[in-house]
Protein backbone atom coordinates (compact mmCIF):
# COMPACT_ATOMS: atom_id res chain seq x y z
CA UNK A 1 0.00 0.00 0.00
CA UNK A 2 1.38 3.38 -1.00
CA UNK A 3 1.79 5.88 1.82
CA UNK A 4 -0.47 8.92 1.84
CA UNK A 5 1.39 12.23 1.66
CA UNK A 6 0.37 15.85 2.05
CA UNK A 7 1.97 18.84 0.34
CA UNK A 8 1.40 22.28 1.85
CA UNK A 9 2.07 24.97 -0.73
CA UNK A 10 2.27 28.58 0.37
CA UNK A 11 2.00 31.17 -2.40
CA UNK A 12 1.24 34.80 -3.19
CA UNK A 13 -1.98 35.57 -5.05
CA UNK A 14 -0.20 38.37 -6.94
CA UNK A 15 1.87 35.64 -8.68
CA UNK A 16 -1.13 33.45 -9.53
CA UNK A 17 -2.74 30.42 -7.92
CA UNK A 18 -0.87 27.10 -8.33
CA UNK A 19 -2.77 24.90 -10.78
CA UNK A 20 -2.25 21.52 -9.10
CA UNK A 21 -3.97 22.03 -5.74
CA UNK A 22 -6.70 19.85 -4.25
CA UNK A 23 -7.68 22.36 -1.55
CA UNK A 24 -7.16 26.12 -1.49
CA UNK A 25 -7.28 28.43 1.52
CA UNK A 26 -7.00 32.22 1.36
CA UNK A 27 -5.42 33.70 4.52
CA UNK A 28 -5.42 37.37 3.45
CA UNK A 29 -7.82 38.10 6.33
CA UNK A 30 -5.12 37.39 8.96
CA UNK A 31 -2.90 40.12 10.52
CA UNK A 32 -0.31 41.21 7.94
CA UNK A 33 3.34 41.59 9.06
CA UNK A 34 4.13 43.38 5.79
CA UNK A 35 2.96 46.65 7.37
CA UNK A 36 5.29 46.31 10.37
CA UNK A 37 8.67 47.85 9.43
CA UNK A 38 10.68 45.46 11.64
CA UNK A 39 8.94 42.40 10.09
CA UNK A 40 8.49 43.43 6.47
CA UNK A 41 11.81 42.01 5.24
CA UNK A 42 11.44 38.76 7.21
CA UNK A 43 9.35 35.74 6.19
CA UNK A 44 6.94 33.33 7.81
CA UNK A 45 9.96 31.11 8.52
CA UNK A 46 11.03 33.65 11.16
CA UNK A 47 9.69 33.10 14.67
CA UNK A 48 8.83 36.81 15.09
CA UNK A 49 6.65 36.75 11.97
CA UNK A 50 4.95 33.51 13.03
CA UNK A 51 4.21 35.00 16.46
CA UNK A 52 2.80 38.17 14.86
CA UNK A 53 0.52 36.21 12.53
CA UNK A 54 -0.62 33.62 15.08
CA UNK A 55 -0.95 35.98 18.06
CA UNK A 56 -4.54 36.94 17.29
CA UNK A 57 -7.77 35.24 18.29
CA UNK A 58 -8.86 35.07 14.63
CA UNK A 59 -5.61 33.35 13.61
CA UNK A 60 -5.80 30.79 16.40
CA UNK A 61 -9.48 30.07 15.73
CA UNK A 62 -8.85 29.73 11.99
CA UNK A 63 -5.93 27.35 12.53
CA UNK A 64 -7.96 25.21 14.95
CA UNK A 65 -10.92 24.98 12.55
CA UNK A 66 -8.84 24.29 9.46
CA UNK A 67 -6.79 21.66 11.32
CA UNK A 68 -10.03 19.99 12.46
CA UNK A 69 -11.27 20.07 8.86
CA UNK A 70 -8.08 18.36 7.66
CA UNK A 71 -8.31 15.80 10.47
CA UNK A 72 -11.76 14.90 9.12
CA UNK A 73 -10.79 14.97 5.42
CA UNK A 74 -7.50 13.07 5.32
CA UNK A 75 -8.93 9.61 6.18
CA UNK A 76 -11.77 10.22 3.70
CA UNK A 77 -9.33 10.93 0.86
CA UNK A 78 -7.42 7.75 1.79
CA UNK A 79 -10.68 5.74 1.71
CA UNK A 80 -11.25 7.04 -1.84
CA UNK A 81 -7.86 5.72 -2.89
CA UNK A 82 -5.96 9.00 -3.09
CA UNK A 83 -2.24 8.87 -2.26
CA UNK A 84 -1.52 12.59 -2.16
CA UNK A 85 -3.28 15.80 -1.13
CA UNK A 86 -1.99 19.23 -2.18
CA UNK A 87 -3.20 22.06 0.05
CA UNK A 88 -2.57 25.63 -1.05
CA UNK A 89 -2.35 28.49 1.45
CA UNK A 90 -2.36 31.90 -0.21
CA UNK A 91 -1.73 35.44 0.96
CA UNK A 92 -0.89 38.57 -1.00
CA UNK A 93 2.83 38.10 -1.63
CA UNK A 94 3.58 34.61 -0.32
CA UNK A 95 6.19 35.75 2.21
CA UNK A 96 4.51 36.09 5.60
CA UNK A 97 1.01 34.84 6.42
CA UNK A 98 0.79 31.90 4.00
CA UNK A 99 4.26 30.69 5.03
CA UNK A 100 3.49 30.98 8.76
CA UNK A 101 0.14 29.19 8.42
CA UNK A 102 1.60 26.55 6.09
CA UNK A 103 4.34 25.82 8.61
CA UNK A 104 1.87 25.57 11.52
CA UNK A 105 -0.35 23.21 9.51
CA UNK A 106 2.66 21.16 8.49
CA UNK A 107 3.63 20.65 12.13
CA UNK A 108 0.05 19.68 12.97
CA UNK A 109 -0.28 17.20 10.09
CA UNK A 110 3.03 15.58 11.05
CA UNK A 111 1.88 15.36 14.67
CA UNK A 112 -1.15 13.29 13.65
CA UNK A 113 1.01 10.87 11.69
CA UNK A 114 0.95 11.93 8.04
CA UNK A 115 4.08 12.60 5.96
CA UNK A 116 4.06 16.22 4.83
CA UNK A 117 6.13 18.43 2.54
CA UNK A 118 6.25 22.22 2.90
CA UNK A 119 6.68 24.17 -0.32
CA UNK A 120 6.96 27.97 -0.12
CA UNK A 121 6.65 28.83 -3.80
CA UNK A 122 7.00 32.61 -3.66
CA UNK A 123 9.07 33.15 -0.50
CA UNK A 124 12.09 34.45 -2.46
CA UNK A 125 10.19 36.67 -4.93
Image (cartoon, grey):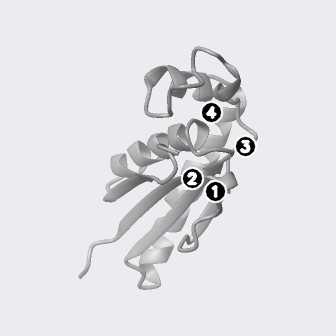
* Along the line of sight, the residue nearer the viewer: 33 or 57: 33
Q: CA distance from mark 2 to mark 1?
A: 8 Å
> Where does the image place residue 79, in percent across and percent down from the top left?
44, 80
Q: CA distance from mark 3 to mark 2?
A: 11 Å
Q: Residues within 10 Å of mark 3 (few under 14, many from 20)?
A: some
The residue indicated by pointer 4 is: 60
Q: Residues within 10 Å of mark 1 (few under 14, many from 20)?
A: few
Q: Earlier in the sequence, mark 2 or mark 4?
A: 2
Query: Which label number is shown at residue 15?
Result: 1
Residue 24, located in which quarter of the rendered image? Answer: bottom right
| Quadrant (top left/top right/bottom left/bottom right) for the N terminus | bottom left
Query: Which label number is shown at residue 111?
Result: none
* Residues at circles 1 and 3 in contact by the CB criterion of under 8 Å: no
**Secondary structure at numbered mark 2:** strand
**Secondary structure at numbered mark 4:** helix
* Residues at circles 2 and 1 in contact by the CB criterion of under 8 Å: yes
The residue under the point 58% across, 14% down is 38
* Residues at circles 3 and 2 in contact by the CB criterion of under 8 Å: no
Query: Which label number is shown at residue 28?
Result: 3
Amino acid sequence: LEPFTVSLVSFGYKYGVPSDLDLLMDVRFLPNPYYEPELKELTGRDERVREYVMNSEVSREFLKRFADFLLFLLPEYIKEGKHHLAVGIGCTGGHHRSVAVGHALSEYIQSIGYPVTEIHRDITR
